[in-house]
Image: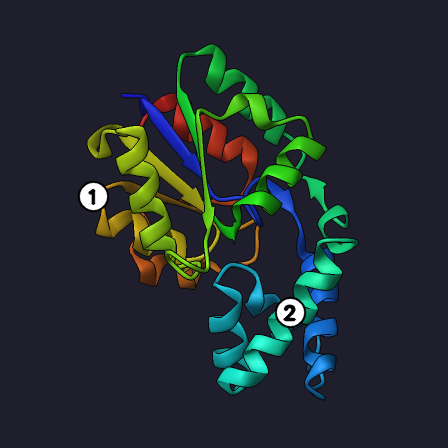
Amino acid sequence: MEPKAVIFDLDGTLTESGEGIMKAAIAGLAAVGRESGGTEKLQKLIGPPLTEGFSEVYGLTEDECKEAVRAFRAYYETKGIFENELYPGALNLLRTLRERGTALYLATSKPELQARRVLAAFSLTAYFKGIAGGDDTRDGGNKEKILSRLVQTQAIPAAAAVMVGDRAYDICAANALGIAGVGVTYGYGSREELEKAGATHIVSSIDALTDLLFRGL
C-alpha cells in the first residue's frame, strides 16, 4: 500500500547542498583556527546539528562550537544557501506524489527559515503541507525532536507515513516514532550507515525511490 504521508529530509535527499555547506563549514573552522581536513571529513557535517557535528568531527569545545556556528551561518545565509542544486527527478517525484493525493512534509535539522528559503528558491514550497526545521531554543537541531514536533502539529499518522533521508539521524528519528524509514545513498550517508540505523528500505537513486513509494512498502 502506498504511504499516505511522505516526510522528506532536505540536504542530501531533495537537494545537493554539499558545496555550500562545506564552504560554510570551512569558514566556521577558520574562525577558530582549524583546518577542514578535506572533503570526506567535511561531508560528515552534512546532516547532524551543527554544534554536534563540529564537536564530534572536529573536537571543538563548547565556546569554539558557538563561534564556528556563528561564522558558518554568516557565510551560509549570504552565499552558501544558493550553492545548491535540486537532484534530477526530485521535482517530478514531488509533483507526482501530490497528484496521487500523498501528503508531503519536510523535516530538516537546518533552521526552518533557511529551509524555507531553499524551498522558495526551487519553487517547492507549495508542495509541502508542513515544514519543520531546527530551532536552537526548542530542540537544538535534534532530528527526533524535529520530526516529533512535525508529526504532532500536523497530526500525521505514523503507521501510514514514511520518512525519507540520507543519514542515520533521519532513520533513527523515524524508528523512534514508529515511522518507516527509507534511506537514500545518493546523498551524503553510506549504505552501511543506513543499514546500521535500521532503514526499512535503502535505494540508490530518485528513480528507485519513486518506484518504491508508488509500489508501496
The reply, left or right, for residue 158 in relation to residue 187 is left
Mark 2 belongs to which amino acid?
Arg
| Secondary structure of residue under mark 1 | loop
Query: Residue 129, can we see it?
Result: yes
Rendering coords of residue 17 (x, y %): 67, 51
In the rendered view, does 21 fall on the left or right side of 14?
Answer: right
In the rendered image, which residue does mark 1 sit on? 178
Residue at (60% x, 22% y) in the render: 92
210 on left or right of 27: left
Task: Pick the residue in front: 108 or 93.
Answer: 108
Residue 126 - label: none
Is 206 drawn above or below residue 24 in the view shown? above
- Is any part of residue 107 visible from this angle? no
Amino acid carrying mark 1 in the image: Gly
Task: Note whether 102 is above or below 77 in the view shown.
Answer: above
Q: Residues within 10 Å of mark 2 (few under 14, many from 20)?
A: some
Give x and y (percent) for residue 113: 58, 44
Q: Comparing marks 2 and 1, which lies closer to the viewer?
A: 2
Q: Position of residue 133 (x, y in %)?
A: 47, 46
Image position of 31 with respect to 189: above or below: below
Q: Secondary structure at mark 2?
A: helix
Q: Label 2 belongs to which residue?
A: 70
Residue 128: image x %, image y %? 49, 26
Determine crowd level at label 1: few under 14, some 14-19, many 20+ residues with C-alpha closer than 10 A. some
Residue name at image x 37 percent, y 49 percent? 146
Q: CA distance from mark 2 to mark 1?
A: 35 Å
Placement of the C terminus among the 4 image quadrants: top left
